[in-house]
Image (cartoon, grey):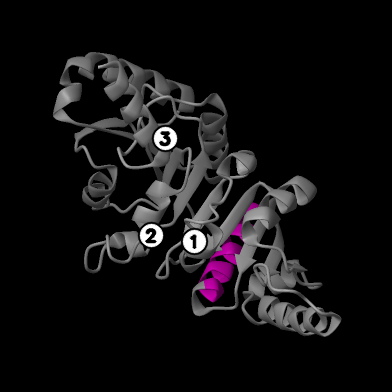
Amino acid sequence: MKKILVLTDFSANSVNAYGYAVKLACHLKAEILLLFSTNGSPLSLTDQFQYSQQLHSFATRYACDSRRKINPLNTECLISGDAWQTLLPNMVSVHQPDLILAGSALLPLLDAPALPLPLESLKSCPILWIPEKAIYQKYEHLVFATDFTDQDAGVLSAIDTLAQEFKANVSLVHFYGGQDLEQWPEIKKAGDALCQSLQSNGGCHLVEEEDMMEGIQELAGHPLPDVFVIGTRDLHLTHQYLNQVFRKTNSCLTSIPLLSFYQAKTKPCTGSCAHCQEEHEKQAHHA
């Protein structure tokens, strides 16, 4: 991982996300591209100049001492007036970052009901969402919440690469409901194969819980994982994870980042995302 595209809107949440990104980049010896957008509002030449000054000041002020020594010329700053939904695919195509990093407060702007983020166009570049209380520490334990029987080789390879860069363990977790008990041996066999393919000693775990977000809440005990990982067709689960209303009081999900990959799932994942609704409608039609 050599290039991280960091999104900002100058909010306190973005300050925390940028600070997290700086420390992550220092560990990976990665380049940072800091991107600000007016999200569709026109930019005059005066606006561009003022935002450029503000962005460079932001990048310098909130960089850690290590970053200043490693990169004395500061971070590359990018400004746009385009809507985030069209801007991000273009940025990924042009700059080819390995990772997009954003504060959790930016999610409603990036993925609005009327204009959702085209996640498929970002499939080469996962998004790391930083909750408001997240504090960076070297990754030692990643938890991949996934369906053991519905995998994407590209996503697995990317997770494996990230784990190797940090020498971190990856725990694989499959949530299942009572109706899945008949498939338990098949699921267990698929999980064992996944553990071997990732060469991780974090192990694979089967947890009886139909709601993935409730399951993740219960999983986030001790020791706490450094990052949760998911692979989905859209950002429905991400909205649930970062939703202040959904999360329980003092939930540790307010401090654990979420790494979201695009994955062309073949099975329903939560029962309420767009893909799940389509699958349920198909099943009802054929019943």
Q: Residue at x 41, y 40 (%)?
A: 274
Q: Which mark is residue 69?
A: none
Q: From the viewer's perspective, is residue 96 above or below residue 157?
A: below
> Badge 3: how crowded within 10 Å, few (<14), some, or many (20+)?
many
For marks 2 and 3, the one nearer the N-term is 2
Alpha carbon of mark 1 to alpha carbon of mark 2: how far?
A: 8 Å
What residue type is disc 1 on? Leu
Assign a secondary structure to mark 1.
helix
CA separation, marks 2 and 3? 20 Å
Above or below, comparing residue 256 to residue 158 in the picture: below
- Asked if the residue under mark 2 is in contact with the one under mark 1, i.e. CB atoms within 8 Å, the reply is yes
Eye-nearest disc, 2 or 3: 3
Give the magenta part as a residue range: 14-30
Residue furthest to the right: 45
Q: Is residue 118 magenta?
A: no
Q: Is residue 22 magenta?
A: yes
How far across and how far down the image is residue 100, in percent?
A: 61, 54
Of residue 24 and residue 117, the one placed in the foreground of this image is 117
Please name the residue that numbered disc 3 is placed on.
Answer: 275
Asked whether the viewer can see residue 234, the reply is yes
Secondary structure found at label 3: helix
Q: Which residue is mark 2?
A: 242
Residue where numbered disc 1 is placed? 107
Quadrant in the picture for residue 209? top left
Q: Quadrant of residue 247?
A: bottom left
Asked which secondary structure carries label 2, the reply is helix
Which of the two discs, 1 and 2, labels the residue nearer the N terminus?
1
Residue 227 coordinates in the image, percent (x, y)? 42, 51
**Mark 1 vs mark 3: in front:** 3
